[in-house]
Amino acid sequence: MKRSTYIVGNWKMHFTANKASVFVKELIPLLKDVPVHVWIAPSFTAIEAAFLAAKESSIKVGAQNMSAFLKGAYTGEVSPEMLLEAGAHFVILGHSERRQHFNESNAMISSKVRQAVKNGIRPILCIGETLDQRKKGRAEEVLEQQIEQGLKQLSIEEIGQVLIAYEPIWAIGTGMAATPEIAEKTHHSCRLFLQAQYGEVLATKIPILYGGSVKLENTASLVSMPNIDGALIGGASLEVNVFEKIIKITEERVR
Ligand code: PGA
């Protein structure tokens, strides 16, 4: 079975609604008939503008976070229903910046993943180890725990809706991407873990994206790996021409 390939732009806290809309309008004409799924995740306030700008194209818009609650007295939170109404198709959950700066635990992320799936929003579950954990030989164990905890509230059928993004913390925003060999080895071990936990059919189906200092120069070598089904891109997704070139390079994986 051939898995789909995804290029996802994580815009973090960079673009206003206006800028997001202009970016999308510039990107659309550059992407005629691309066989890669192109997804972008702006800030909450820019989701609707980006969605409206992307409407006539195949680009999907999503969020970078979501509440684990459906409604109620949760000041500052954004619910799945609100995201859906704004046009969100997917949501990035458990990004290491959220785990690190906002104390998101595996338990909290697990509830968010559950709410996303229940509400028809595809979750991208982010996992990643620190440099220290890798040096101590604990990377696999940490990643397996993040996967297991993140998916534990889902049925086997629901797990089929999830995408996983492997983002080693030491590679995010540092310019120091994992080598294609290290990334492939890690993706492969995550896939073996998925297979052991949920069976071969699901393990073969779930896209595992790589994230962490993906740039024009390293895209080809990363996405040519058999278990790397695309990329989650921060810095290099902020310039239309760079992002477009990364998408074009990724097309090679699909053809
Ligand atoms: P980066 O960020 O591409 O800027 O390293 C990736 C991410 O945090 O998703």
Image (cartoon, rainbow, N blue to C red):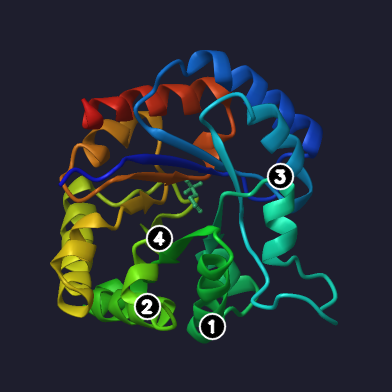
Disc 4 element = loop
Whole-number angstrom distance, CA of label 3 to CA of label 4: 21 Å
The quadrant the C terminus occupies is top left
Disc 3 element = helix
N-term-proximal mark, 3 vs 4: 3
Question: Which residue is labeled 1 in the image?
Answer: 105
Question: Which residue is labeled 4 in the image?
Answer: 161
> At 30% from the left edge and 42% from the top edge, which residue is drawn?
4
Whole-number angstrom distance, CA of label 4 to CA of label 1: 21 Å
Query: Could you tell me residue 178's position as x and y percent?
Result: 29, 52
Query: Could you tell me residue 89's position as x and y percent?
Result: 57, 49
Front of the two marks 4 and 1: 4
Question: Neighbour class for label 1 at 10 Å: few (<14), some, many (≥20)?
Answer: some
Q: Amino acid at mark 4?
A: Gln
Front of the two marks 3 and 2: 2
Front of the two marks 3 and 4: 4
Front of the two marks 2 and 1: 2
Q: Is mark 1 within 8 Å of ligand 1?
A: no
Q: Which numbered circle lies on residue 155?
A: 2
Question: Which residue is labeled 3 in the image?
Answer: 47
Q: How many marks?
A: 4
Disc 2 element = loop
